[in-house]
């Protein structure tokens, strides 16, 4: 097996120069870097991660924190993060832990402070000041997807605008009795993105002078949560709405399933709009506001690498685009 010394000898440089050329750390001229890389290819040299860490002070690993591995958004986001990190030569160390658990408390209080990462990507962090403060206190650069602080890079969509666009679409069709479906009622426990979406719905209703019709059907942001919340709302015949704006597509799909089981036609009797453009949205002909979590994951890696190479760089806050996709789950009310 070839060593860094073999590569250095083949390229005619010192071991330190060869290490810098292969790791990307420190200055090496373009010609020298090309010569060292050619020598490494000829010798089939592969750097051992521990040796690279000792030589450069870098671990070539990034910690990634998400609250839920089962939700479509996070699985798509992780696909983008993994693609970006793998392409850049970094390992991904994944922590999937629900908010409010003892395991998550131990992660922030004990595990992360003693682990060495070149950077951290955190997605879906809830509005807990102590967790955001701990992230900001790490020596490694941090990028968050969704909510973040002044000390972290942030990748997000405009959640309030997404819900406002979804609600305005229904209002433009003539709906006035519109319920926001999904998301926790307790603001202290609600995800920041979900909270902003609820705000966007309320803003659109208020702008249309529909304040008296604002209603929130609490439920987990999932198909099951959307189904349960929709059953409660639709079961009340006297106060049955003509439309749902769902906190996410999974809740919207749960709402559609609930309506069908109750014999309510979608969209003739109930229009439904989601947010995300979930992989099953087309199957349910769901009108939705599309976001692209895989691209958000790639962008998070890009911002993290910028912070790695430019430690004094001010954190970037990037708002990714979203757009209304009209399918056949919405129409004018009867």
Image (cartoon, rainbow, N blue to C red):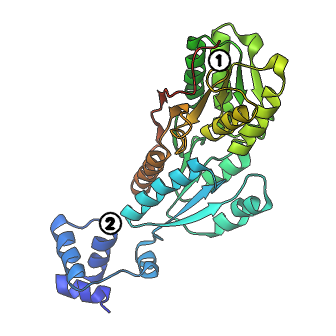
Relative depth, front residue between 329 and 50: 329
Residue 203 visible in the displayed image: yes
Q: Residue furthest front?
A: 263
Q: Does residue 312 show up?
A: no
Residue 13 is situated, as x and y percent measured from the top left of the image, at 20, 81
Mark sitting earlier along the chain (2/1):
2
Q: Which residue is mark 2?
A: 26
Between marks 2 and 1, how big is the CA–CA gap?
Answer: 51 Å
- How far from the left and from the top, in percent, is residue 163? 60, 26
Q: Position of residue 106 (x, y in %)?
A: 75, 63
Mark 2 vs mark 1: give the one in front: 1
Quarter holding residue 128: top right
Q: Secondary structure at mark 1?
A: helix
Q: Quadrant of residue 235?
A: top right
Quadrant where the image shows the N terminus: bottom left
Q: Secondary structure at mark 2?
A: loop
Residue 231, relative to residue 333: is it above or below? below
Relative horizontal placement of residue 235, taking residue 93 as reference (left or right): right
Query: Is the residue marked by circle 1 packed among few (<14), some (14-19), or many (20+) residues within 10 Å?
Result: many
Residue 36 x, y percent position in the rendering: 21, 76
Residue 328, placed above or below residue 276: above
Where is the C terminus found, in terms of image quarters? top right
**Relative to 72, 308 lies left or right:** left
**Image point (75%, 14%), residue name:** 213
What residue is shown at x 27% (from left), y 78% (from top)? 18
Crowdedness near tag 2: few (<14), some (14–19) or many (≥20) residues, C-alpha within 10 Å: few
Residue farthest to the bottom? 1
From what the image shows, is residue 23 above or below residue 240?
below
Task: Report the residue marked by disc 1.
Answer: 203
Camera-side residue of 107 and 240: 240
Residue at 64% x, 69% y: name it: 114
């Amino acid at each position: 097996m070839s060593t860094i010394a073999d590569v250095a000898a083949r390229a005619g440089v010192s071991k330190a120069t060869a290490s810098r050329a292969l790791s990307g750390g420190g200055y090496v001229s373009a010609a020298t870097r090309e010569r060292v890389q050619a020598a490494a290819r000829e010798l089939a040299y592969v750097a051992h991660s521990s040796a690279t860490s000792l030589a450069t002070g870098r671990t070539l690993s990034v910690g990634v924190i998400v609250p839920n591995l089962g939700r479509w958004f996070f699985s798509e986001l992780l696909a983008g993060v993994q693609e970006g990190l793998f392409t850049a030569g970094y390992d991904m160390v994944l922590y999937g832990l629900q908010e409010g658990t003892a395991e998550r408390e131990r992660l922030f209080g004990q595990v992360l402070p003693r682990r060495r990462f070149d950077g951290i990507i955190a997605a879906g962090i809830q509005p807990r000041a102590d967790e955001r403060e701990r992230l900001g206190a790490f020596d490694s650069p941090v990028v968050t997807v969704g909510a973040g602080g002044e000390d972290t890079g942030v990748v997000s969509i405009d959640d309030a605008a997404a819900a406002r666009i979804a609600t305005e679409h229904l209002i433009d069709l003539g709906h006035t009795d519109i319920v926001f479906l999904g998301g926790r009622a307790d603001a202290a426990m609600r995800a920041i993105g979900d909270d902003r979406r609820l705000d966007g719905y309320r803003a659109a209703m208020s702008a249309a002078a529909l304040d008296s019709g604002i209603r929130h059907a609490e439920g987990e942001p999932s198909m099951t949560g959307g189904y349960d919340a929709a059953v409660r709302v639709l079961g009340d015949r006297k106060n049955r709405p003509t439309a749902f704006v769902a906190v996410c597509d999974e809740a919207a799909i749960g709402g559609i399933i609930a309506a069908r089981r109750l014999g309510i036609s979608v969209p003739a009797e109930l229009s439904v709009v989601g947010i995300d453009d979930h992989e099953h949205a087309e199957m349910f002909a769901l009108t939705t506001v599309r976001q692209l979590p895989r691209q958000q994951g790639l962008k998070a890696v890009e911002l993290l690498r910028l912070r790695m190479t430019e430690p004094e760089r001010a954190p970037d806050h990037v708002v990714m685009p979203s757009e209304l996709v009209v399918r056949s789950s919405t129409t004018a009310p009867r």
